[in-house]
Image (tube, grey):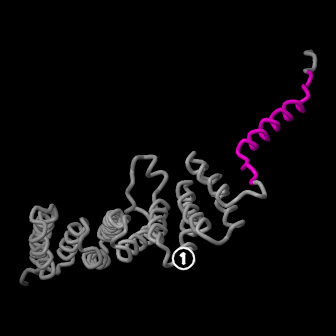
Amino acid sequence: MAPPTTMRNPFPIILMLLTVLLSGCSMFKTEEIPEDATVEEIYAMAQEGMANGNWGVAVERLRQLEAKYPYGVYAEQAQLDTIYAYYRNSEPGLAIAAADRFIKLHPTHESVDYAYFLKGQASYEEDKSNWGVFLGKDDLSDRDPTLTLNALNTFEEVYTRFPESQYAPIARERIRYLTNSLAKHEVAVARYYQSKDAHVAAVNRAKGIVEQYPDAAAVEDALGLLLTSYIAMGLYDLADDSRRVLELNFPDSKYLVEADKLSRGISQSDQDEGFLSSLRNLFRRQPAG
């Protein structure tokens, strides 16, 4: 029989792990601000954190500055910097809240356009999927459009309220991208309805795209969906109207070819059904007695 193994005392190991853990925590502990620190000194410490990419430390410094010196230009600048620090620290929800606060407190501030812009940026980032970024995809069209709408509305405010702002051109580019994303989302929904033969619902979605996003690239898809759904429902006058608009704006559209194939298929099906109906009627006739 083997001799019993002696169990080592685990206490030294546990103590060592706790020591490492506590020393690690102390590495990230924010340095205490002296009681007599001036607003300039605290702001300089916050700026140092931002310059080094220590966004969490920077936020803490900025909040301490505002708590100790709640009024004046430094407090206002700290509020603006807090928005940016939250945004860079991948905390878009907190960045949006900080931006809303600044806009409410300082609606006529000379840098309020920057607060709106950062709010839009944070809303845009909040809508991006981490998995999408990881997989190399940055397409918002297959997600809940609520956050996309929030970002779009904020960038539209930047562009319309502050057309001379340095952020207006970037906001315009974001508006174009987000509009296309929303239109593509509606196309995906319309295609789903069409695949389930829910053509009325597909038509309504496609109409909404044409009316709400007339400049989006997805308008071609919307017109194609209108055309093919009208054909499938046998509404050929409406299908002809859709075809004319599609041919005028997208003469090389693939949907024109698809519509022709669909029309031929329906026509052939009707011919086959007519032939079979004739045969059924023939065999139903009773011979004369």
Q: Which residue is mark 1?
A: 106
How far across and down, in percent of the image, does residue 98 sit?
Answer: 58, 68
Residue span colored magenta: 6-33
Frontmost residue, 110 versus 170: 110
Residue 136, above or below 11: below
Frontmost residue, 271 versus 178: 178
Mark 1: secondary structure: loop
Left or right position of 100 against 38:
left
Quadrant of res 70: bottom right
Residue 58, above or below 23: below
From the image, which quarter does the N terminus lie in? top right
Quadrant of res 284: bottom left
Badge 1 amino acid: His
Left or right position of 231 against 162:
left
From the image, which quarter does the C terminus lie in? bottom left
Residue 210, above or below 289: above
Frontmost residue, 126 versus 34: 34
How far across and down, in percent of the image, does residue 92 sit?
Answer: 54, 61
| Residue 147 can be seen, yes or no | yes
| Residue 189 can be seen, yes or no | no
